Image: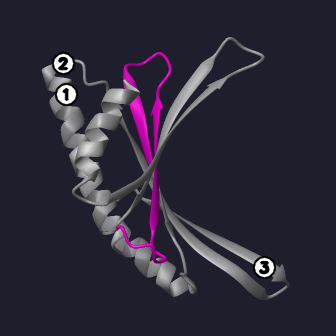
Amino acid sequence: MLQRMMEILDQTLSGHGVIRDVILRTEHSLLEDEETREITVYVTASAEESEQPLATVHLFPLPDAAACEVEAQIDYPGAVEAEAAARLWERAREIVPDVSLTEKRRCLNPGVLAEYGVTLDFHFVVEEPDTDETNAHCRQALDQFAANLGRLLRL
């Protein structure tokens, strides 16, 4: 299922951003007879090497279900003030109403901000594309996701 989802995502994302890397992770528990798989896709708005937002897309097959969870995290480098983060979140909620915002602050000394970052994230579940109807629904959901992700990368 992950392979098929990645094929569709590759096609849909190509019109909205640049895929920088794709990583397949397989983990096997040493305590339980359990294996998990995940695909992580890194996407930017353009091929430029400049500092720009980076989207990390995770694909997780759901256990005991013919479905896959799609999670997107968009990191915005260089945001330096809370008002800018609030405006970014407002604009992002116009694109994806259930998007959440995380602010990360790193201080080396009390009151001295060394690093500040903003991350937007959202997720949804897509059924496995095993019939024509679910294939069309999956394709439509991933098309909309790719368009939304492209717009969020350009905020």
- Which quarter of the image is occupied by the C terminus? bottom left
Q: Which residues are magenta?
A: 47-71
Question: Are the residues flagged by discs 2 and 1 in contact, CB closer than 8 Å?
Answer: yes
Please state the horizontal and vertical placement of residue 40, each as a whole percent of the image: 49, 43
In the picture, measured across the screen, residue 33 lies left or right of residue 85, that is right
For marks 2 and 1, give the CA distance. Answer: 6 Å
Up the image or down, 44 lies above or below 69; here it is below
Mark sitting on residue 107: 3
Please state the horizontal and vertical placement of residue 131, each as a whole percent of the image: 18, 18
Please state the horizontal and vertical placement of residue 103, each as a whole percent of the image: 60, 70
For marks 2 and 3, give the CA distance. Answer: 52 Å
Which residue position holds label 2? 131
Q: Residues within 10 Å of mark 3 (few under 14, many from 20)?
A: few
Q: Amino acid at mark 3?
A: Cys
For marks 3 and 1, give the CA distance. Answer: 48 Å
Q: Residues within 10 Å of mark 2 (few under 14, many from 20)?
A: few
Mark sitting on residue 28: none
Q: Amino acid at mark 1?
A: Asn
- Which quarter of the image is occupied by the N terminus? top left
**Residue 145 appears in view:** yes
Is 152 magenta? The answer is no
Indicate the colouring scheme: one colour
